[in-house]
Image: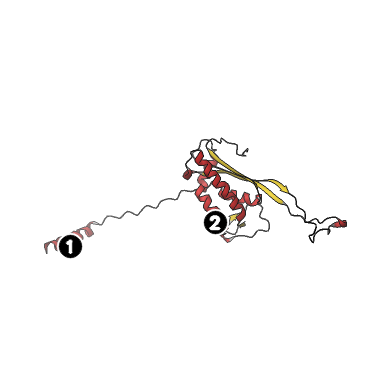
């Protein structure tokens, strides 16, 4: 299969899912949520969606969608079905990275996309209540479509030479390094206090 990523693929582990029976809009939102994250952190995000514990932001396709206090009042949801499908593709990409000899624990998601592939139009069955209720004796306008989509995921080391400067910059932005707090150094005791303590020690020694 041809992938939509247009950079060198020698040091990138790719995987795809084709004809996924899920909304490509939900799949796109999950891809946006995990793109440029480290692999283990992306799996935590997906598991939070599946367990309905962590909503994700919908920057588009959010008409009539409720706001979430977890997202600071912005619109979001829990696309559980899409998250499960993307989790399978992500685990497949991790397995492909082992075959390429890449360090599994140092990989980041450098490519994640979802696109619509095809739509199957379905009409109501002949015995349904909606049959024959259309205009001028024609069949009903009501129909239920099946939507299929494809997902692509690519994993790579952040130091891979084929990555663009913008990719490396976004990886640093989405994975900030936590500063380690150093322990406060103990101040040396003042000279008068040190002399008093030494005098006490000498007095106890004479006794």
| Residue at 54% over, 47% down | 91
Single out the residue that lies furthest toward the bottom.
207
| Residue at 11% over, 62% down | 206
- The foreground one among 203 and 49 is 49
Q: Which residue is mark 2?
A: 48
Q: In the rendering, at what x and y percent does residue 104 appear? A: 48, 44
Single out the residue that lies furthest toward the front.
127
Query: What number of labels is visible?
Result: 2
In the image, taking residue 66 as reference, residue 161 lies left or right, namely left
Q: Picture quarter containing residue 144? A: bottom right
In the figure, 21 relative to 64: above or below?
above
Q: Separation of disc 2 and disc 1 at Cα? A: 61 Å
- The foreground one among 164 and 16 is 16
Q: Residues within 10 Å of mark 2 (few under 14, many from 20)?
A: some
Q: Is disc 1 placed on a helix, strand or loop?
A: helix
Q: Earlier in the sequence, mark 2 or mark 1?
A: 2
| Residue at 50% over, 41% down | 98
Q: Picture quarter containing residue 167? A: top right
Q: In the rendering, at what x and y percent does residue 174 appear? A: 52, 48
Q: Is disc 2 placed on a helix, strand or loop?
A: helix
Q: Residues within 10 Å of mark 1 (few under 14, many from 20)?
A: few
Single out the residue that lies furthest toward the left.
206
Q: Which residue is mark 1?
A: 200
- The foreground one among 29 and 198 is 29
Single out the residue that lies furthest toward the right.
136
Decide: marks 2, 1 in contact (CB < 8 A)?
no
Q: In the rendering, at what x and y percent does residue 18 appear? A: 64, 45
Foreground tag (2 vs 1) = 2
Query: Does any portion of residue 157 appear in the rendered image?
Result: no
The quadrant the N terminus occupies is top right
The quadrant the C terminus occupies is bottom left
The disc at residue 30 is none
């Amino acid at each position: 299969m041809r992938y939509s990523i247009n950079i060198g693929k020698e040091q990138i582990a790719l995987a795809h899912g084709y004809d996924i029976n899920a909304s490509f809009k939900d799949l796109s939102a999950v891809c946006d949520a995990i793109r440029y994250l480290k692999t283990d952190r992306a799996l935590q995000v997906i598991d939070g969606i599946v367990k309905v514990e962590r909503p994700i932001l919908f920057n588009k396709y959010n008409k009539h969608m409720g706001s979430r206090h977890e997202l600071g009042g912005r619109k979001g949801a829990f696309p559980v079905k899409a998250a499960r499908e993307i989790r399978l593709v992500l685990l497949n990409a991790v397995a492909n990275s082992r075959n390429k000899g890449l360090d599994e624990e140092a990989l980041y998601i450098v490519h994640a996309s979802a696109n619509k592939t095809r739509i199957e139009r379905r009409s109501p069955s002949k015995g349904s209540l909606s049959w024959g209720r259309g205009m001028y004796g024609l069949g009903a306008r009501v129909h239920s479509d099946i939507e299929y989509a494809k997902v692509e995921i690519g994993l790579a080391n952040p130091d891979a030479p084929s990555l663009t400067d913008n990719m490396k910059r976004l990886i640093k932005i989405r994975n900030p390094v936590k500063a380690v707090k150093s322990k406060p150094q103990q101040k040396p005791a003042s000279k008068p206090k040190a002399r008093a303590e030494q005098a006490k020690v000498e007095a106890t020694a004479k006794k």
